Image (cartoon, grey):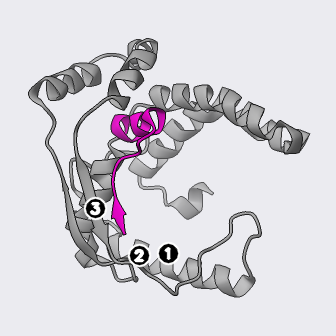
Amino acid sequence: IVKFPSPIEANKALGMVFGSYEKEILTYVELGPHFTVKIPRCYFGAFEPQKRSEAVAQRVLKALPDTVTVKLLDRLMAQAGKSQRRFGLVIEDLAGARVGDQVAGCSVEDAELALRALARMHATFWESPLLDRPWLLPLDDSVAVQHAIYRKAWPVFEERFRDILTPEVRAVPEWNDEHGPALLAGKCALLRAGVTPAQIE
């Protein structure tokens, strides 16, 4: 399987703004050998470094309040979608494996297999110094920016699926629109204070 950035500028912009392409490649290259669960073998993974101007602009943005960044979001996304940085990832084709169906769901047996694999993965990296890497940002990094992108995406989603969105389903994004940033920031604060995910739930 050979992976490159999306040719669709809007999709590519998201990957660039959140550093998704770098993170995926670095996960395979730097953390892949330490996984205790089956992941595709990585044959090649590399990306071009940021241009000096891009790096400077990113440092300036990080120094700005999120409210300012949100106001500049449309311009930032348009510029990110036009980036010429190259990314490449070549991974093993797990042909023969079953692909899950998010719509149909799965059996209890499949759910147990998935949860056991997730537990083994989390146990491997639990409080591990392997995760002390600058490209692994905290969950609450740029919460306001993440939420602004969510708000931009929701009308498109709503228009596309309006015929099957029940009142119960609509209530979730409506609640998240008002409380999402505070919920994420509060959860991260609890994790930093030593509260376990199970206790938070």
Q: Is residue 82 magenta?
A: no
CA distance for labels 2 and 3: 22 Å
Badge 3 marks a residue whose secondary structure is: strand
Q: Which residues are magenta?
A: 1-18
Question: Identity of the amino acid at label 1?
Answer: Leu
Instruction: Look at 68% across and 69% down and name the residue there.
Output: 101
Q: Earlier in the sequence, mark 3 or mark 1?
A: 3
Q: Is residue 95 visible?
A: yes
Residue 78, placed above or below residue 142:
above
Q: For the residues carrying marks 3 and 1, which lies nearer the camera in this image? A: 3
User: Percent position (x, y) of residue 139?
Assistant: 42, 45
Rendering coords of residue 89 (x, y %): 28, 61
Taking 101 as reference, is 186 left or right?
Answer: left
Residue of label 3 = 89
Q: Which residue is mark 2?
A: 121
140 or 154, nearer to the observer:
154
Residue at 41% x, 75% y is 121
| Above or below, 134 relative to 43 | above
Question: Can you say whether 100 is above or below 145 in the image?
Answer: below
Q: Quadrant of residue 158?
A: top right
Dot 1: element? helix
Query: Which quadrant does the C terminus fall into?
Result: bottom right
Amino acid marked by disc 3? Leu
Count of numbered badges drawn on the protein: 3
The span from disc 1 to disc 2 (Cα, nearest Å) is: 5 Å
